[in-house]
Amino acid sequence: MPASPLFQPCFSPETLMTSSPSLLPPIRWPAEAIWEAVAPLLPGFTVEVLPEIDSTNSELMRRFKGGPGTPPQREPLLLVAEQQSAGRGRLGRSWQGRRGDSLMFSLGLPLQPADWSGLSLAVGISVAESLEPPAAGQARHAGRPRIGLKWPNDLWLSTPQGERKLAGILVETASWDGLRYVVIGVGVNIRPVALADSAETPLAAVAPGGLQELDSGIDAAEALLRIVPALVQAVQAFEQFGFEPFQVRFGLRDVLSGREVQLSDGSRGTAHGVAENGALRVHTAGGMVEVSSSEVSVRPVAGGTPPC
Ligand code: BTN
């Protein structure tokens, strides 16, 4: 194995097979393959896998800030956790995932886009396309599950039985001395399990979907390998070009398009896709409005038209 700056503090290759703390089968994380794909794009990139942490997002934020005797971490880092004791979702919600049943990771890196609008949407597009490539996504076979995007950044699994949340994204930033560091947290349900986010929208307030409904052979390690290199490229494209090149790709998977939605201020309207900056366009009684993710949450009205 070539020397590379990978850290797996609790699992060396030798102990991986024998000393899993939960006595569950070890997960063979493709840390080396990911590092080889990403390091040429992101100098200084490292991969770290932990058996448990409170939250990978929280940990990367702590490392960015540093502390007494702990130098700040400002280099690109992929942190994967097999378990999280206090996983966090958007809007102060919690995110629960079980070892092997969920993929939980955060990617932290310095980023300097001219405009941050739409970054979390671009991340969702990249993750969705990695898990269900566009060609397959566009050819709609009757009854085949599809991965859709629910603005601003949830991935939904659409099946003939309905729509369920498949994955969530939590993007956070920190700055120090003019340096902006972004932490992109991604949680993907691999196997459908108990409710992961019961405070979700009515349509998704059922047991979440699992990626294995789409691809029965996939596991958390394989999903990570599919997602991360493409995600790094997407984030770098976003840094250079902003959200505009992602707009059409979002539209191909937009599960809210044409549906009645309710905004967090109580107003209602029909969703009309996203603008060039990633804002949701909603036709309300007062005309077309553009809603940015920081201002509102969007709740499909029960009984809204399902996507075709
Ligand atoms: C959401 O759906 O509201 C976002 C969920 C994000 C969950 C991931 S799991 C890895 C990373 N660490 C966290 O604490 N949250 C994100």
Image (cartoon, rainbow, N blue to C red):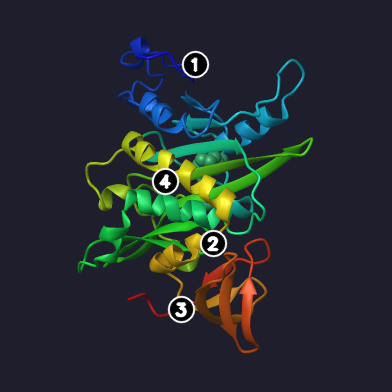
- Give the amino acid at mark 2: Pro
The residue where tag 3 is placed is: 259
Q: Is mark 2 within 8 Å of ligand 1?
A: no
Quarter of the figure with the C terminus: bottom left
3D distance between C-alphas at marks 1 and 3 = 47 Å
Q: Position of residue 175 (x, y in %)?
A: 74, 39
The residue depicted at 56 percent of the width and 71 percent of the height is 275
Earlier-in-chain disc, 3 versus 4: 4
- SS class of the residue under badge 2? loop
- Can see residue 96? no
The residue where tag 1 is placed is: 9
Quarter of the figure with the N terminus: top left
Q: Position of residue 67 (x, y in %)?
A: 75, 23
Circle 3 residues within 10 Å: few <14, some 14–19, many ≥20? some
The residue depicted at 37 percent of the width and 76 percent of the height is 306
- Give the amino acid at mark 4: Val
3D distance between C-alphas at marks 2 and 3 = 15 Å
Q: Check contact, mark 1 vs mark 4: CB within 8 A.
A: no
Q: In this image, 108 relative to 259: left or right? A: right
- Give the amino acid at mark 3: Arg
Circle 2 residues within 10 Å: few <14, some 14–19, many ≥20? many
3D distance between C-alphas at marks 2 and 1 = 35 Å
- Give the amino acid at mark 1: Pro
> As rendered, which of 47 and 102 lies closer to the eye?
47
Earlier-in-chain disc, 2 versus 1: 1
Name the disc covering residue 188, or none. 4
The residue where tag 2 is placed is: 152
